Image (cartoon, grey):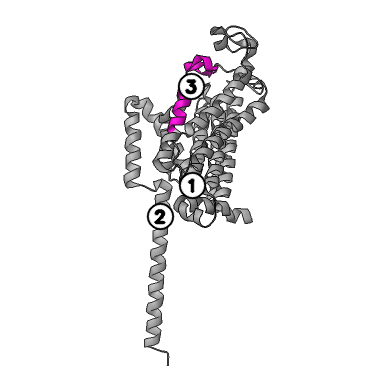
Amino acid sequence: MILARFLGPRVWILIAAILAAAILVPMANLWLPASHPLHVPSYIVPLWGKYVCYALLALALDLVWGYVGILSLGHGAFFALGGYAMGMYLMRQIGARGVYGNPDLPDFMVFLNWKELPWYWYGFGEFWFAALMVMLVPGLLAFVFGFFAFRSRVTGVYLSIITQAMTYALLLAFFRNDMGFGGNNGLTDFKDILGFSIQADATRAGLFAASCIALAIGVLLVGWLTRSKFGKLMIAVRDAESRTRFIGWRPEYVKLFAFTVSAVMAGIAGALYVPQVGIINPGEFSPVNSIEIVVWAAVGGRGTLIGPVIGALIVNYGKTVFTALAPEFWLFILGSLFVFVTLVLPRGIVGTIDHGWDTLRQRRRARDAEKGEADDAAAVANPAE
């Protein structure tokens, strides 16, 4: 009961909706016949699962941008690293079923005439190790990067530029064949995950449900963090970093913690994304992808918790529609959307709605106060006999 009041009804409604989708969508896909009007086609399930992963990624960015004021243009790197960690596990599960039939080496290594598995691929034959790396690798990169950046008091546009430089450097590195990650083709042709066929409808439904559960946990975690005393400290760093430092706090530690947690969330989103789309390649490191994440959060409303989730779902659904109807115009539409939101809806969809409700409540309180003062004045002018 205390936790319910602490997070507020809106957060719990969002969590309930996400968990309901985790149950209803797989049921509608697996149990209802194709002729049923509520049946969800099999190709829709991984598509919606991809949207859910993007929503978790947008939520991760909102933790640092909306509540700490760090505009990261490199969150696509954390997402891609989590995806590569999962992709390496999935590649190891192929075994001798690859094109070249090598039980130890992935096909691209056989093609490049590699003789043995690189040391950094060891352990990825086990799911628990891959799951650990999904969180550890993005988190460690964010910790090291953030430690030096925040300790040096790099802020604002300079921090945004170096985060984008980081993801671009990783893009160039992963494109190289000698890195051992598949070069420009990346990792693909996955067969199984935890022993289940990755193409089976039941597996896809399970991955969708897992993505929804991860998103619900992410909303709960970010909601708890931002509404706690630490959340108030994050907002203080965002709004008045110098004053926060003056009264004795270390803003760089606050930023570092939030940045690391955000990176881990992004890595988990990437790990859930890869088995549903069936591929991970260096294109996921593209700076354009990181900019798109910012657009999702901005459209929904940064610093509102549920805004980035809604923004990610709306923008990516629009992307699916417009890239099918007019693919050559999608980037123009995306850019125009960002400009429109910046100029007309700077608070985003949810933030604008909240501001509107707050304005109405303030006006109603003002009218009630004026009415009360008028009634008091009338009572004083015309006392009852």
Residue 145 drawn at (x, y percent): 52, 35
Looking at the image, residue 218 lies above or below residue 353:
above
The segment highlighted magenta reads 164-188
Residue lying at the far bottom of the rendered structure: 385
- Amino acid of disc 3: Ala
Q: CA distance from mark 1 to mark 2?
A: 20 Å
| Chief secondary structure of the magenta portion | helix
Q: SS for tag 1?
A: helix
Asked if disc 3 and disc 1 are in contact, CB closer than 8 Å, the reply is no
Residue shown at the point (38%, 25%) measured from the top left: 324
Q: Measure the C-alpha gap from mark 2 to mark 3.
A: 44 Å
Residue 68, disc: 1
Circle 2 residue: 355
- Which residue is under mark 3? 173
Q: Is residue 186 above or below residue 113?
A: below
Q: Position of residue 65 (x, y in %)?
A: 46, 43
Query: Label 1 amino acid?
Result: Val
Quadrant hosting residue 162: top left
User: Residue 16: where, in percent of width, then height?
Assistant: 57, 45
Q: Position of residue 7 (x, y in %)?
A: 57, 52
Give me the residue at 56% from left, 43% from top: 257
Amino acid on which the number 2 mark rests in the picture: His
Q: Earlier in the sequence, mark 1 or mark 2?
A: 1
Nearer to the camera, 130 or 345: 130
- In the image, residue 345 lies in the stretch drawn in magenta: no
Q: Is residue 184 visible?
A: yes
Q: Is residue 284 above or below residue 17?
A: above
Binning the other alpha carbons within 10 Å of mark 3 as few (below 14), some (14 to 19) or many (20 upward) gives: some
Q: Earlier in the sequence, mark 3 or mark 1?
A: 1
